[in-house]
Image (cartoon, helix red, strand yellow):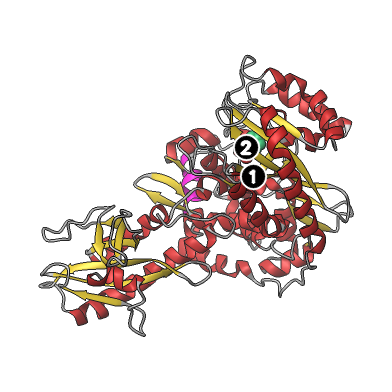
Amino acid sequence: MPATKTPLDADADTDAPGDPAVPPAEAGTPPAEAVTPLIRGIAVLRRLTEAGGTLSPSALERATGLARSTVDRITTTLQHMGYVRLDGRDVVLAPPVMALGNAYLAALRLPALLDARADELADELDESVSLAVADRDGIRFIHQATRRRAMSLSFRIGDLLPAERTAPGPLFATDWTEPDWTHWRARRAADPEDGEFPAVPRRHRTTTPESEDFVRRSALAGTDGYALDDQLIEPGLVAVSVPVRDPATGRVVCAANVVSHTSRHTAADLRDTLLPRLREAVTAMERDLSEAPRLIPGPPPSDLATWTTASKHELGRDFIESLARGLTVLTVFGEGRAALTLTEVAKATGLARATARRALITYAHLGLVTPTPDAHTFTLTPRVLSLGFPPLSRTTLPHLAEPHLRALADGVEEWAGLAVLAEPSTPSEPESPAPMIQLTARATTPRVLSPDITVGARLPARSTSLGRALLSEVTPQGYALADEELESGLRSIAVPLHDRTGRVIAAINLSTHAARRTLADCVTDLLPALTTTATHIESDLHTASRFTPIPPT
Ligand code: PHB
């Protein structure tokens, strides 16, 4: 009689012939207890992130070295979790995957405490300001307050840069021990062009002479208390950084950076004119840290992973349960839950201790989780931000809404749209102009008679359902109708979209021809799908905007 299979054993049959035990980029022999499907799933998320968020299944096959059938099962599992979606044949990262990076940022607590100061400084200086943490011999951004300029900077939250090509790097290196320096030298020798850092252009000696000087720059940073980046990443890009210390321990917890380009400031200029203001802001940040109330952790989540069993029943061998369960382990960390014991992780996920332990061992091997020095608790590392966060942190509401509008329009076979209230177009418009809306996304259907309204179009708010939903002319049931007011034959129904604070920021609608549906039909036939779509868009928006603003247009 065969022994009863555990969920982990059941996943062993997802191995396809020829699959490497570990994808090449995750090399390094994993401990015997590591969960192979979890290592592979993480590899897929990382390759997608490095590629900017989209890869075809065959490109994923090449990038991970896994067999196509394995890639497909991983993709199905991630899709079921909402972490990726399929766009045609392409696999695309989806906003719910940001829950992983959010868990790290919430547990770290620095963004919640310091982002507002960084944003204020950016406004005051009219320069980009960022916050970065040390990630081994790299630096990783945890906040970006970017100026919208013609010549704008492109680093995103979660991007990893080699320490020696940045301003914060020398500040973090003041804490390095000899093994850290040895590790750094080995990395430089193995990867002389910084190919392992997809966020930065390849290194050329001619453009980055100072990168050879890192030891000296780090020693200087220790005495000066600041460091400069004089075009180490790219010609024209300059930055100045100051360490932010935890007042309780004196340890550097992150660096605050002011970033500009040489047509506005030289590096010396940044030091002479903006460094004093940066230092004042950092003093205020350190005061905020010392005054931050101790977090009283709320009730921990419980039984997060119970849904995985149902999914396994539904999807059978296409659903890799140990991958889904392993990923839920990352999401139990958060605000007030920065360091968790194995027992706490097992309880929050609902996983058996042995399963939770194997997931933690796997993550420790991958550098995503680190045991605290006493080895009793575990914390997330900044590397968790490499799981989907950077490409998605630069999304916009129209971009995020589009796949949902597409599914809605396909489902009910009607035209779907997204709109915001428009700013008055010219200063010469009358004092209180009639409010206008602007269409920011749409999904059409192959009907002969359908609205001919393109993205960017401005329409009078009061005669459209979208405008009425935006102006809170909605009924107590939460929707707005428009019946041939804009054009005869055009009938539509709209619902508002809310941001994390509950404010109405946009609206979505479905439009039909009056001959196809009565107003009552619109409510009974279209409203349920419209409302469900609004819930999905809001859910994505709330996840995506937890640590970075998502522009409504
Ligand atoms: C950035 O925030 O974009 C930044 C910060 C420090 C650097 C370079 C870029 O050295």
Q: Which of 529 and 66 is in front in this view?
A: 529
Q: Quadrant of the C terminus?
A: bottom left
**Residue range highlighted in magenta:** 68-76
Kindly identify the amino acid type of the residue bearing the numbered disc 2.
Val
| Residue 232 position within the rendered picture, expressed as x and y whole percent measured from the top left | 65, 25
Q: Quadrant of ligand 1?
A: top right
- The vertical placement of 214 against 12, above or below, is above
Dot 1 lies on which element? strand
Q: Which residue lies furthest to the top in this view?
A: 206
- The vertical placement of 186 against 143, above or below, is above
For residue 537: magenta? no
Kindly identify the amino acid type of the residue bearing the numbered disc 1.
Ser
Q: Distance between the residues labelled 2 and 1?
A: 8 Å
Does ligand 1 reach within 8 Å of label 1's beta carbon?
Answer: yes
Does ligand 1 reach within 8 Å of label 2's beta carbon?
Answer: yes
Which residue does the numbered mark 2 point to in the structure image?
A: 259
Q: Which residue is drawn at 70% across and 61% down?
A: 333
For residue 72: magenta? yes
Dot 2 lies on which element? strand
Which residue does the numbered mark 1 point to in the structure image?
A: 130
